[in-house]
Image (cartoon, helix red, strand yellow):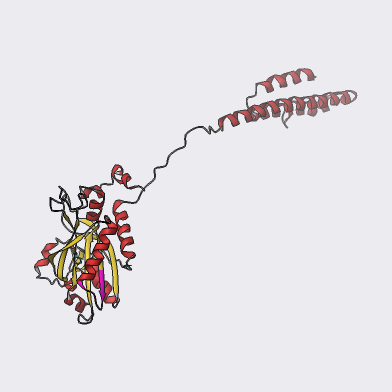
Amino acid sequence: MEDTEKIAVEAREEAEKAESSRALYEIKMKFLGRTGKVTALLKGMRDIAAELRPAFGKKVNDLREKLEGIFGEIEARVKAKEMEKKLASEKIDVTEPGRHTAQGALHPITRTRDELIDVFAGMGFEIFEGPEIETEYYNFTALNTPADHPARDMQDTFYIGDGVLLRTQTSAGQIRLMEKKKPPIKMLSPGRVFRSDDDATHSPMFHQMEGLVVDKTITLCDLQGMLDEFARKMFSSSAKTRLRPSYFPFTEPSVEVDVSCTACGGKGCSLCKGTGWIEVLGAGMVNRHVLENCGVDPDEYTGFAFGMGIERIAMLKYGIRHIRSFFENDTRFLQQFKD
Ligand code: PHE
């Protein structure tokens, strides 16, 4: 018969060494589990003389209770330590500076487009968006620019199929809208256009903002008044505009529109090359052939149209020198357009 006192001492010694509640549990099972030492003692009762059994049983039971007490006490200690460790590792230092998430901003072209939309929406224009892949008919023919017309060479066109091209101008949208909607019309049409043209101020893809107004008594004066309002809202309250005669096949008369220089206000500087004026858009009275092509009676209705490059407006407004800055995605450039 093994000395139960010895077993208790052995159990305590082993239990004290346990570093985790999991390890402690395994030690406990070595003594009190189904195949543990104490259970083995109880099983050995059969081999003991009958008169000794009650005393032996009591001893083993006392031992079991004692061990349970020992393991309970040590378990409480181990668990407390474990909790302490867990709390220490999960501690949050509220004085640490926060992590920054980089915040994006609207692209200057998007910004300028939205500003233009605001200006014209305030005058009652409605937005219309045409397709970027167009047919020759909408991009040229219906705009009074037939196949042999020299004006087709004014814009170097990307053809992508027979009679199919990347639109060179948002003017194509004029036709699409007038085919669908009868006057009065006040359309504003922003979008991407494509030309094989590439230098400091030209990019093969750029953005235009087209305008079209058609009604019964529209004159060039209406165009001029609207342009003045546009220049004051978009550039400065003292901005002025002037019209110069020009040529587009889809307008007659056609004009090129200048605004007083955005850098010097009109005194003359390097940006305006000493003239005080900067060209910002093309415009004119809608050519009667264009109206006819869309089923609008040119003897009843007249209209004006204008088209501007959004990049150009943005370059003037923000003093940007190189058109490529818009498309390089350099965040040092783009970040400057945050509110
Ligand atoms: N579509 C012309 C261009 O891209 C601009 C324009 C639009 C001129 C409307 C007159 C009227 O150059």
Residue at (73%, 26%) from the top-left corner?
73
- Observer-nearest of 41 and 311: 311
- Ligand 1 positioned in quadrant: bottom left
For the question of whether residue 3 can be seen, the reply is no
Q: Image height check: is 124 above or below 264?
A: below
- Observer-nearest of 283 and 35: 283
Quarter of the rendering occupied by the N terminus: top right
For the question of whether residue 78 can be seen, the reply is yes
Residue at (22%, 66%) from the top-left corner?
224
- Observer-nearest of 10 and 272: 272
- Observer-nearest of 215 and 19: 215
Residue 81, image x, y percentages: 64, 27
Is 214 inside the magenta-drawn segment?
A: yes
Is 309 inside the magenta-drawn segment?
A: no
Q: Image height check: is 176 above or below 334?
A: below
Tell me where the magenta segment starts and ends, as one range. Answer: 212-219
Q: Is residue 323 left or right of residue 96?
A: left
- The outermost residue toward the right is 51
Residue at (16%, 49%) from the top-left corner?
271
Residue 32, image x, y percentages: 74, 29
Residue 75, image x, y percentages: 70, 28
Q: Image height check: is 196 above or below 189?
A: above
Q: Quadrant of residue 149?
A: bottom left
Give the tally of numbered discs.
0
Q: Image height check: is 179 above or below 201?
A: below
Q: Is residue 62 left or right of residue 22?
A: right
Residue 104, image x, y percentages: 37, 47
